[in-house]
Image: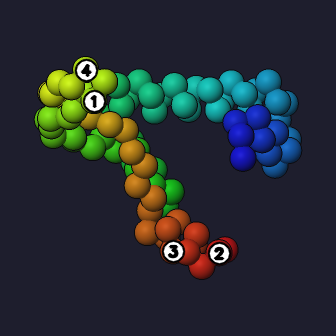
Amino acid sequence: MTKADIIARIAQDTGIEKSVATTVVEAFMESVRESMIAGNEVFLRGFGSFILKQKAEKKARNFSKNTTIVIPAHHVPAFKPAKTFLDAVKEGK
C-alpha cells in the first residue's frame, strides 16, 4: 500500500476530499518526522510506537581502500507495533 492508496482510502471511508486527506496525511507524517528529529518518540495506543534505537559505535572495514573506519554512535528510527496489532497480523486478521 502506497501513500496515494492510503489517501484514497481515507477519502473514501470518511467522505472528505482527496486534497483534505492529503493535507492530513502529510501533516501527520511531518509531525512524526519533526518529533523524532527532536529526539522524541511517538506513541499511538493500539497501533504502535515510532521509537529511536541507539546504535553503538563500531569499527568497519573499507575493503576497497583496505582501511578501518569508525562508525560513531547514532540513533535510527524504528517502529514497534502494539501487542494487539502484532497479534492481529500474526493471526492474519
Mark 2 packing: few (<14 Cα in 10 Å), some, or many (20+)?
few
Is label 1 in contact with label 3 (beta carbons under 8 Å)? Answer: no
Name the N-terminal-most of marks 3 and 4: 4
Is label 1 in contact with label 4 (beta carbons under 8 Å)? Answer: yes
In the drawing, does residue 4 fall left or right of residue 43?
right
Q: Nearer the viewer, residue 60 or 49?
A: 60
Q: Amino acid at mark 1?
A: Phe
Residue 24 vs 47, above or below: the answer is: above
Looking at the rendered image, the disc whose residue lies closer to the viewer, 1 or 3, is: 1
Q: Amino acid at mark 4?
A: Lys
Mark 1 packing: few (<14 Cα in 10 Å), some, or many (20+)?
few
- Mark-to-mark CA distance, 2 and 3: 9 Å
Name the N-terminal-most of marks 1 and 2: 1
Residue bearing mark 2 = 92
Q: Amino acid at mark 2?
A: Gly
Name the N-terminal-most of marks 2 and 3: 3
Visible residue check, residue 78? yes
Residue bearing mark 3 = 87
Visible residue check, residue 14? no
Residue bearing mark 1 = 63
Q: Secondary structure at mark 3?
A: helix
Q: Position of residue 62 (x, y in %)?
A: 25, 27
